[in-house]
Image (cartoon, grey):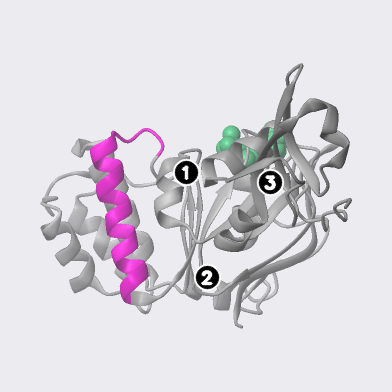
Amino acid sequence: MAIALEASGLGKRYGSTWAVRDLCISIPAGRVVALVGPNGAGKTTFLQLAIGLLTPDTGDPQVFGWSPRDNPTLVLARVGFLAQERPLYMGFTVAETLRMGRELNPKWDLALAEARMRRLEIPLNRRVGKLSGGQQAQVALALALGKRPELLLLDEPVANLDPLARRQFLAELMESVAAEGLTVVLSSHLIADLERLADHLVILAGGRLQVAGDLEPLLEDHRWLVGPTEEIGRVGGTVVQAGTGERQCRMLVRGPAVPRGWTAAPVTLEDLVLAYLGNPDVSALAQPEAVPA
Ligand code: ATP
């Protein structure tokens, strides 16, 4: 299986604070990855390391097998990056912005980018500074996609957009994913959006990797268990979250078996993400312990 982005022991430090620490990760090509974590978890730092905007203190990420530090030209030709603050020249018109894309990228498809703007009814002769936030986001996406990247890194691209603009942005993104088969890493706090789009999950906590894997097996591997509090010792696997009452307890666990007499229910992506975010010391990377008989 082709790997789009991988790293081993990747770290970036600011003074005595590790923004990303000892990160080992392998993202298969063709996935749409939800990159999740609380504020300050290291998501932006990870994405900037991946594109070579930051130099790591330990490790060296590989993008389709190339190091952004040693082979920046090869990496930049393959990767599109949409930064959190969407850097656009507010004084440029949309047409000038797209032409700038052509000057900067050898594989640039101007006709495709302009057609995209027309379809979204974004006037080519309007200054970017006069567009709505949603329209600016679409221009930034067109810039990132116009270079026909194989890997697209998006850092909270829909934060601050209203629900309709958000939906249009994500629909546009998914159309390109379907048409081009590109790999996407999308950082966002909006789990409902990620639930619709993503097929791979990465959770960072305190700069470290907490969870990584394809979504379907991860969801199948976790469950809600409800049973008598006095029997809590019978629950095996990794307990991600536990709510214990006097008589009954409810736990989100990663593990293979359900103790007799307990009820089990499937988890959603939202359950999973919230449970791990609320318990940053629990990792889904370790193998679950054996379940007692
Ligand atoms: P958010 O969800 O708020 O965007 P994040 O997960 O993207 O957060 P980062 O922006 O990568 O997190 O920050 C990770 C850590 O590194 C934080 O503790 C942050 O304060 C620190 N950090 C990031 N950039 C710098 C910098 N330029 N100088 C010093 N510390 C920094």
Residue of label 2: 76
Residue of label 1: 156
Quarter-of-image position of residue 179: bottom left
Residue at x-position 13% and y-position 54%:
124
Q: Nearer the viewer, residue 204 or 254?
A: 254
- Circle nearer the viewer, 2 or 3: 3
- How dense is the environment of label 1, judged by Cα within 10 Å: few (below 14), some, or many (20 and up)? many
Q: Quadrant of ligand 1?
A: top right
Q: Nearer the viewer, residue 19 or 271?
A: 271
Return the x and y of residue 95 as percentages of the image width and height.
18, 58
3D distance between C-alphas at marks 2 and 3: 25 Å
Mark nearer the N terminus (1 vs 2): 2
Kind of residue sitting beneath label 2: Leu
Please report the bounds of the magenta region as a residue range: 159-179
Residue lying furthest bottom: 1
Where's the N terminus, which quadrant? Answer: bottom right
- Circle nearer the viewer, 1 or 2: 1
- Circle nearer the viewer, 1 or 3: 3
Q: Nearer the viewer, residue 170 or 254?
A: 254
In this picture, is 143 found above or below 131?
A: below
3D distance between C-alphas at marks 1 and 2: 20 Å
In this picture, is 251 found above or below 2?
A: above
Residue 197 seen: yes
- How dense is the environment of label 2, judged by Cα within 10 Å: few (below 14), some, or many (20 and up)? some
Residue at x-position 11% and y-position 59%:
118
Return the x and y of residue 195 as percentages of the image width and height.
45, 49
